Amino acid sequence: MTTIGRTDDNDLAIDNQVHQPPSRAECSRGRTSPCSEDLGSTNGVYVNNRRISKLTLKDGDQVTIGKSRFRFALKPATQR
């Protein structure tokens, strides 16, 4: 599980140069696939420009938290 947001207590802290209420999301690896979940943010979490509460992520999805946008990418499994 990784938390992403605009406060320093997140695993990935987003620089908050715009004075807005903090947004916070959680990305976790479920049993079969990764998901993103809004942790009660004021501004919401968006995946592909659609506000979500919880959603399974797919390779290439765009996740927007506040004014920051990320692209979710699946890393291929390493062959041994």
Image (spheres, helix red, strand yellow):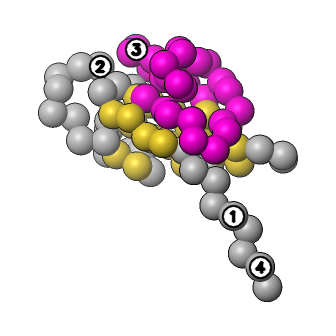
Residue 29 location in percent, x, y? 71, 48
Mark before the other along the chain sequence, 2 or 4: 2
- Mark 2 and mark 3: Cα distance apart in space: 6 Å
Q: What element does badge 1 sit on?
A: loop
Which residue in the structure is indicated by mark 1? 76
Residue found at x 61% / y 18%: 53
C-alpha separation, residue under disc 4 versus residue under disc 3? 42 Å
Specify the amino acid type for callout 2.
Pro
* Residue that sits furthest to the front in the current view: 60
Say which residue appears at 84% left-offset and 47% top-offset.
31
Dot 2: within a 10 Å radius of its alpha carbon, few (fewer than 14), some, or many (20 or more) residues?
A: few
Magenta range = 37-64
Query: The disc labelled 1 sits on which kind of residue?
Result: Pro
Q: Are marks 2 and 3 in contact (CB under 8 Å)?
A: yes
User: Viewer-proximal residue, 4 or 76?
Assistant: 76
Identity of the residue furthest to the right in this view = 31
Q: Which mark identifies residue 42?
A: 3
Q: Residue at x 24, y 19 (%)?
A: 20
Q: Are the residues at dot 3 and dot 1 in contact (C-beta closer than 8 Å)?
A: no
- Specify the farthest residue to the bottom: 80
Q: Earlier in the sequence, mark 2 or mark 3?
A: 2
| Residue under numbered circle 2 | 21
Q: Secondary structure at mark 3?
A: loop
Q: Which residue is mark 4?
A: 79
CA neighbours of label 4 inside 10 A, class few (<14), some (14 to 19), many (20+): few
Assess whether mark 2 and mark 1 are in contact (beta carbons under 8 angstroms): no
Q: Is residue 34 magenta?
A: no
23 or 46, nearer to the observer = 46
Residue 22: x and y, percent?
A: 33, 25
* Residue 72 coordinates in the image, percent (x, y): 54, 44
The residue shown at (22%, 35%) is 16
